[in-house]
Amino acid sequence: MAKILLKGLAASPGKYKGIVKIVFSPQEASKKIEKGDILVTSMTDPDFTPFMKKSGAIITNTGGILSHAAILSRELGIPCVVGTKRATDVLKDNMEILVDGLKGLIYEVK
Amino acid sequence: MFLAPLEIKMTILEKCGITKRIINGLIKKGLFVPKKVRPVKKPIRSPSEEQFYRVADRFTPPFTKKEKEFYIKNPNIFCEHLIKNAKFFVKTGELLYDTSEKAQKSLPVKKAIAALLVIQRISHALLDYNYLKYDRHLEYHDYKESPVGYYWQKLKKLCLLAALKTKKPNPKELATQKMLELISGYGIIIKSSKSKKRAQGAYKFLVSSLKNKRLTQELNSLVKIFRQFSLTQEKEVIITYYGLAPRNLGMIEVGFHHFVYLKNLIETHPDLIRSGYKDKVKKWIKNVDFPLVIIGARDFVQVDAEPFIEEIQNLYKEELQRWMPH
């Protein structure tokens, strides 16, 4: 069974396997995020929207069911886990992970 | 006989154009500057509050019992007040933004520091009483004494009931999935026909599982309320991040513009800080950095002008007095 790396709040259903990109600002996201990457950040704001559209899944440290990241992910139909507290610490750039947006879990992929 | 021109004694912000009339107008619209900034005795306890540094801010005044009851009964008014307060926050922030410009350009150093400290204090009061007090409730889905939490728990129960009735495996997961799909489809920032279809599908599934007129009516009203919450959240984010036309100054600009000037003045005039506070002030300045801007700046606000020389303290007290409730 795959190892659970993080738990958070299920914010948008769906499963997605991909590469982690940790970003702290839209400027950083514009340099790092490529189509299909998993966007990992502390919290999102409207300036993140173009990069959220490119992402395959979203993970945030903070936020609830009505947070910006949660609402936009549901509209985009991509998995999202919010309120993980420390995703930006636990996950590392270019790691391959599996996001389960329905269970609110992040798994390691070997 | 020679008569010297009459000098009218003005406070520091009066010199920057902030008349008593302006202050009274702001107070009338809802500005509340407390005499002392103290942590609230009973901050809201929510199982997940520690996840949100902003939500868990124990200085932010909670709703009174009366307010809680009123907003749960009238979620539409809660949404209305939230947006009204977000707009008030941005508009008053614009005024403070201009005032801090005038203060740092036209006042001598000591007066400018005192003026910027007062602006800092008022910015925080605005944030606490007119913005955070409402906004943070959008995060309290697990706290049933908050409007969002109250209706979220109801929706959760109803969706679980529907999922149980289908006798399918993993009813909890099925309920969560349908709930999340149900509250999407009406975005402002992103409009998607696919998510609208998913929401309609989830709704049909729930109605056909519930097979009950009363429960369907309850579901209809919960869906309506939740879409309103979701819409309010998006509107609030747009207002606070992009500001209001024509100036479009967002929350970060209006809320902490003055701090850049304050920081520069403090760093270039360390002699104006009292001896016991030099290291603390250095640390506090360092703390005012994203994403902990609010909590970092709180260190300054809490002690008023205490770390500074007496002359600055007196100017600060004299100005702040004008903003206090009588």
Image (cartoon, coloured by chain):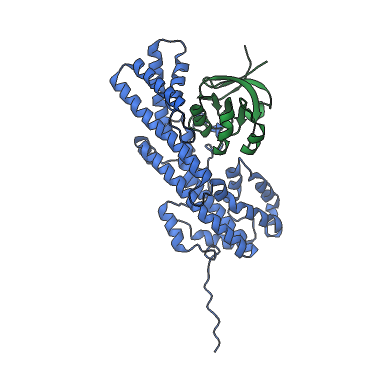
Chain colours: A green, B blue
Q: Nearer the viewer, residue B35 or A13?
A: A13
Q: Residue at x 60, y 33 (%)?
A: A42
Q: Nearer the viewer, residue B91 or B15?
A: B91
Residue at 65%, 60% in the rendered image: B309
Residue B261 in which image quadrant: bottom right
Q: How many marks?
A: 0
In what quadrant of the picture does the N terminus of chain B appear? bottom right
| For residue B167, side relative to residue B313 (left or right) | left
Residue A75 coordinates in the image, percent (x, y) = 48, 28
Outermost residue, left side: B213
Is residue A48 found left or right of B279 in the rendered image? left
Query: What percent of the width, then of the height, locates residue A108?
Result: 64, 18
Residue at the extreme bottom of the image, as rendered? B1
In the displayed structure, does residue B198 sit left or right of residue A55? left
Quarter in which the C terminus of chain B is drawn? bottom left
Compared with B271, A54 (above or below) is above
Q: Residue placed at 52% from the left, 58% from the top?
A: B320
